[in-house]
Image (tube, grey):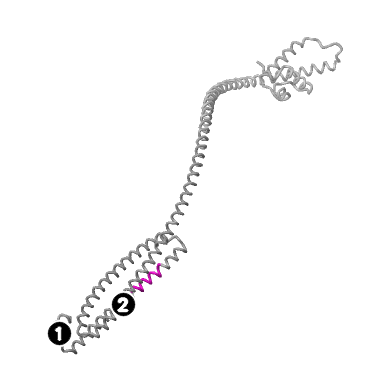
Amino acid sequence: MARTGITYDDVQRAVDTLLKQQEAPSVQKIREVLGTGSFTTISEHLREWRSRREERRDVPPPQGMPAELVSLAEELWTKAQEAAAENLAHYRQEADRNVEAALEKVATAHRRAEDAEQRESALAAHLSSVEARLQEAASEAAHLTSAKQGVEELLTKERERRSQQQDQLERLQQDKEQEAREFQRALEEQQQQQREKLAQEEQRHEAAEARLMAMLDEARRERQALEKSHAQRLKQAEQRHDTLQQQLHALRGELAEEEKRHRETQLERSRSEEALRARGHEVDLLNERIEEQRRLIASHTERLKGLEEKLDEKIWALARQQREQDAASPNDESKLKRDPGRDS
């Protein structure tokens, strides 16, 4: 069956064009004139053209046609028949080959159509799968939208919670500043107490020094009394020596107690220094004051030791002087023989 792309009229016009060019019409030449069409379709239309031409062969030429034109037409027709006879077998073979090739192409087309149907089925299945995935994606998008709303609500709550935390932080900061001010006041009170304690320590040291000086004055007065009374000097010196020893022991006890209090003061001051280390210039001034008091205490201690050594030297000097006087006095010597334990 002829294809709808090439009609009989197209083939007839191509044949007329070839005849005007004094060329025998053939399937190949008609296709060259048309520029398209299959050999099978052109061959069928060409056979139809020849069949119609055979039917019109017995029709006499029109009246009044010139003899030259009739002769030319007959000659052309004869040549066309000869060319057609020569090429008919070749074209028939070629047409058969083309038919076989066309049949193969048709079979291939059928196979391709089947493949296309299979691909179409696969595409339909894939499309169904894609539609299902799209539905799932739409459902997931709705779920994500709902989740987004939930997240936005959580963010709003989180912002509110952070605002509350910020308020709490500001309140804690205010409380911290209040505690810092209270600590500063307590620190200043502690420093004032420390200064008062240092003043009390200075007063105690001055009182101790005054008592020691009074004792030295009393020792001088007793020495003068011993010089006036040789008979009672040794006894009084021994009694005074015992008294002084007791007083010295008491003084040493007081000194030990004073050193203990001083150590306690030092320990308390060390603790205070740990607490006041970050106080800056005021703490440095207090440390300088404490260091000055420490040097003063050390100086007082050295003075106390020096006075104690001087007191011991004077006591021993008085004792030696008394022994020398007793050695010069016979009564005193006999008295010493009767009582040798007093010389020791």
Q: How many marks?
A: 2
Give the quarter of the figure containing the N terminus. top right
- Rendered-image quadrant of the C terminus: bottom left
Dot placed on the residue nearer the N-terminal end, 2 or 1: 2
Quarter assignment of residue 23:
top right
Give percent across and percent down for residue 328: 19, 90
Residue 33 position (above or below residue 207):
above
Relative to residue 188, is residue 311 drawn left or right?
Answer: left
**Secondary structure at numbered mark 2:** helix
**Disc 1 residue type?**
Lys
Question: As shown in the figure, which amino acid type bears the numbered disc 2?
Answer: Leu
Q: CA distance from mark 2 to mark 1?
A: 33 Å
Q: Position of residue 7 (x, y in %)?
A: 71, 18
Categorize mark 2 by other alpha carbons within 10 Å: few (<14), some (14-19), many (20+): some
Q: Is residue 252 left or right of residue 191?
A: left
Residue indicated by mark 2? 307
Helix, strand or loop under label 1: helix
Which residue shows up at 36% across the image and 67% down it?
Answer: 201
Nearest to the observer: residue 41 or residue 286:
286
Point out residue 260 in the picture as x, y percentages from the top left corner: 30, 66
Rendered image: mark on residue 335? 1
The label nearer to you, 2 versus 1, is 1
Which residue is at the front of the view, 308 or 66?
A: 308
Residue 143 shows which numbered tag?
Answer: none
- Depicted 312 relative to depicted 86: above or below: below
The residue positioned farthest toward the left in the image shown: 338
* Residue 295 included in the magenta stretch of the image: yes
Looking at the picture, tell me which residue is in the foreground, 195 or 241.
241
Q: Is residue 74 left or right of residue 94?
A: right
Residue 335 image position (x, y, % from top left): 15, 84
> Which span is picked out in magenta?
290-301
